[in-house]
Amino acid sequence: MSKPSILVIGAGIFGLWQAYALARAGYSVRLIEEGSDPFARSSSRWAGAMIAPECEAEGAPLSVRDLGREGLRIWRETYPGLMSNGTLVVAHARDAGDLARFAKMTEGHAAVGGARIGELEPSIAGRFERGLFFESEAHMDARKAMTWLLDELRSLGADVAFDTHWDGAAHDIAIDCRGIGARQDLATLRGVRGERVLIQTNDVSLSRPVRLLHPRQPIYVVPQGDNRFVVGATVIEREDAGPMSLRSALDLLGSAYALHPAFGEAAVLDMGAGVRPAFPDNVPRIIVEEAGAIIRVNGAYRHGFLLAPVMAQALAAYVSDGRREGPLFDAV
Ligand SMILES: Cc1cc2nc3c(=O)[nH]c(=O)nc-3n(C[C@H](O)[C@H](O)[C@H](O)COP(=O)(O)OP(=O)(O)OC[C@H]3O[C@@H](n4cnc5c(N)ncnc54)[C@H](O)[C@@H]3O)c2cc1C
């Protein structure tokens, strides 16, 4: 029997990984995206793209950590651009309680003192006395990773069409990865706003994401190459992808300045917000509808990059032999 032809809708990180995994498995794949500029309409383009299953366990269900460990393994064996330098979590002395709590909620870290922090990140030497080093974690430049997946997809012979809107039309199998664009068809899906600033400076150099804990305004700073850094943090229960508020900009940039005053001279290259699609428990799902003809892959929340390869692997197994393994297929 010939393999079914597959339509993937949405060129965010979920759609790209679904299409890539299925094209690699020998299916005929067409990927469509309604935006004309690749990724411009996706929430994925805003991501810090940390592949941090251990750190995420601080606030996410343990299933996310366990699936995320597998996600990290797949990224590592697939994507040559992955930067595997770990994550450093630090706090000012007055916030030692936040650091202790973070350590209790997570695994896979080593407690580090000021000297080791200075060895790991010379730019912030002397600024923090205590931290946690999560050696196994990784990160990437979101846009570069998405471009790489797109190029791979094309070289595997997939048909990719931008500026192409899906109106629900049937296909052998349609895999709906529209993110928040699928809200009309997924009653429990909600949008969670996340804001981030992209800055550039020659005066600070980091090799890995640094998370600065703070009771009110924790942030992460993710190095992206070319002296660029993504600064982000916000999780706002609002479905609004509009421009960043002045308060958020002050908070994010103020916290970056607290991490290192040299960020005060950085150029602000870009700032904005994306809407993360999320189910009530903030765990993504694969939802098979209409006798398998429409499959919805959604609910990435803060973990789209972390979990995209695992979602793709699970769906490829389902498409090939009907296996529905693990929590990803549970009812929402
Ligand atoms: C500030 C911020 C930081 C983040 N940091 C991280 C991180 O460090 N690590 C991590 O793992 N995750 C992170 N995330 C989360 C991650 O970015 C999201 O979970 C993920 O991007 C969601 O991907 P998606 O593919 O489901 O949706 P999207 O990226 O939104 O893609 C959906 C696509 O579908 C298209 N579409 C919609 N409707 C249609 C239609 N009818 N026809 C055709 N196309 C359509 C849209 O145009 C869009 O391009 C972050 C998110 C934000 C906002």
Image: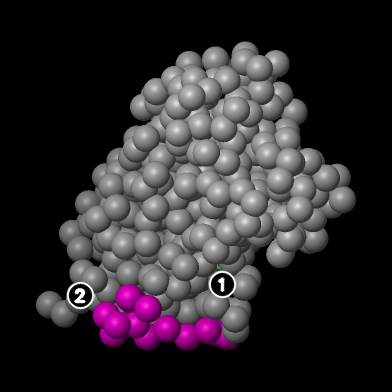
67 lies left or right of 61: left
Task: Give the residue number, with chain letter if any, for mark 2.
Answer: 26
* Residue behind label 1 places its C-beta within 8 angstroms of ligand 1: yes
**Camera sees residue 36:** yes
Asked if one can make out residue 237 in the rendered structure from this viewpoint, the answer is: no
Q: Is residue 152 magenta?
A: yes
Q: Look at the image and give the residue range highlighted in magenta.
A: 151-166
Quarter residue 85 falls in:
top left
Tell me the kind of residue under disc 2. Answer: Gly
Reading the image, the residue beneath label 1 is: 39
Q: Residue furthest right?
A: 246
Disc 2 to disc 1, C-alpha distance: 25 Å
Q: Residue at x 46, y 22 (%)?
A: 112
Q: How is the image coloured?
A: one colour
The N terminus: image quadrant: bottom left
Determine whether, in the image, residue 34 is placed left or right of residue 258: left
Ligand 1 quarter of the rendering: bottom right
Element type at marker 1?
loop
Q: Is residue 165 above or below residue 212?
A: below
Q: Is residue 218 left or right of residue 174?
A: right
Label 2 or label 1, whichever comes before in sequence order: 2
Q: Position of residue 75 (x, y in %)?
A: 32, 54
Magenta span contains residue 22: no
Residue 282 horizontal/vertical position (percent): 54, 40
Quick check: marks 2 and 1 in contact, CB under 8 Å?
no
